[in-house]
Image: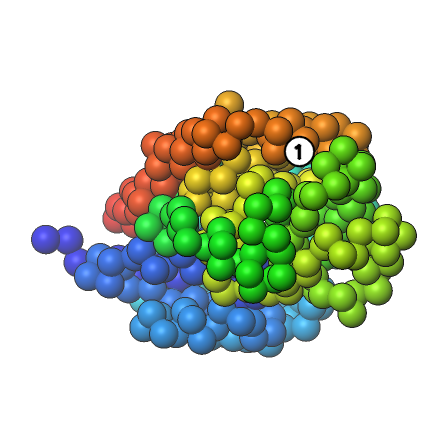
Amino acid sequence: MESRLRIAHIITTLGRGGAELMLYRLLTHSDPATFDSVVFGLAREGELVPQIEALGVPTLVLGMASGVPDPRCLWRVARELRRRRVQVVQTWMYHSDLLGGLAARMAGRIPVAWGIHHTTWDRETMKPATRACARLCARLSRALPSAIVCCSHLSQELHIRYGYDAGRCRVIPNGFDTEVFRPLPEARAEVRREHGLPPGAPLVGLIARFDSTKDHGTFVAAAERLHRALPEACFLLCGRQIQWDNETLAGWIDAAGLRPWFRLGGLRDDLPRIYSALDVNCSSSRTEAMPLAVGEAMACGVPCVVTDVGDSARLLGDTGRVVPAGDADALAGALREVLSLPPAVRGALGESARQRIQEHYSLASTMAQYSALWRDLARSRG
């Protein structure tokens, strides 16, 4: 029997972003008899630290200031990699790719798999320090990593175009736990009752943190158009800063005259219930790689309307509707189209969405692909 593989995960932060959640979910499906894992968080503590430690996975938070390289952090990681006799390093996102790659080299040329979770280097959506780090990683991609894992096909295509070594790139898509994210029929009535919504009201959801890349402004504009056609439609939004004290978001909703039809739920720990209550889930993003909220809703049997960014359309297949980013008219039209379907037809669309996740994007499949990669890298070291 093979001994446990000692693997270190190095990630920039441990908040509730897409890459961070994907790491946490992989750890929940990591067999302790197969993998001896440790997590390094480069920056501040995050909400996921206690959850990761509850899995029995040691977590070292280094407290590096945002955007400020710290050589002491590099030396500390290298020292810990040597002390723990780590065999493979998996990094997540640009800053940890760079620091993790250098630390692994210093610790004895430990094989490294970089993680790519972006699709654009747009100046409007990426900080200058992050763009500089990404460019440096492109130049070092033929020397530091043994493999480069992209979470979406578009991420791979664009990063090869940006100068990343094509021969080391591969796609391992985000995966979804269909036991956790599953249809909960009772949630439809429960969530409506909790939020004071009519039992039969058509309900549109948007689950995303408040960020310019998620484009809540276009969503509200689409909601205003949809409301004119379907006055009974309601809207449930959840995520970080999705609260009425967010003056920008509340201002958009009030300007559209839609406050009575909107519910803002903030951060939620019961997302399977939220998704299961929806008639349609929406992603209005301007940029994505492999959107977790879309796959989660699909796994809960909910049809989705998404913008054509990242691998959103590939993930959705023929189980929903795809519209151009930033087009409120097209978004409203697609939402109306799905809501106007007979309930049985809309339900069948949701069932097809769940089946697609089960067949092509399960968390078990994603974990198996990472496991095979890590084993290959460990063997390559000898």
Q: Quadrant of residue 39?
A: bottom left
Q: Does 280 sit left or right of 104 as displayed? A: right
- Residue most extreme to the top: 318
Tell me what residue is drawn at x 19 percent, y 61 percent.
Answer: 33
Q: Is 209 situated above or below 337?
A: below
- Residue 355 lies, with reference to residue 91, above or below; the image says above
Direction from residue 253 to residue 346 in the image, left or right: left
Of residue 285 and residue 228, the one placed in the foreground of this image is 228
Other-residue count near label 1 (Cα within 10 Å), few / some / many at <14 / 14–19 / ≥20: many
Q: Position of residue 329 (x, y in %)?
A: 79, 30
Q: Can residue 370 be seen here?
A: no
Residue lying furthest left = 1
Residue at 37%, 33% in the rendered image: 355
Residue annotated with mark 1: 335
Is 361 or 89 nearer to us in this picture?
361
172 on left or right of 249: left
Label 1, secondary structure: give it: helix
Residue 208 versus residue 324 in the image, above or below: below
Q: How is the image coloured?
A: rainbow
Q: Amino acid at mark 1?
A: Leu
Q: Quadrant of residue 289?
A: top right
Q: Residue at x 56, y 64 (%)?
A: 194
Q: Residue at x 64, y 64 (%)?
A: 266
Q: Nearer the viewer, residue 356 or 352?
A: 352
Q: How many marks?
A: 1
| Front position in the image: 82 or 347 | 347
Residue 197 is situated, as x and y percent measured from the top left of the image, at: 62, 56
Q: Is residue 230 visible?
A: yes
Tell me where residue 362 appears, x and y as whole percent: 36, 41
Place of residue 363 in the rendered image (x, y in percent of width and height, measured from the top left): 36, 46
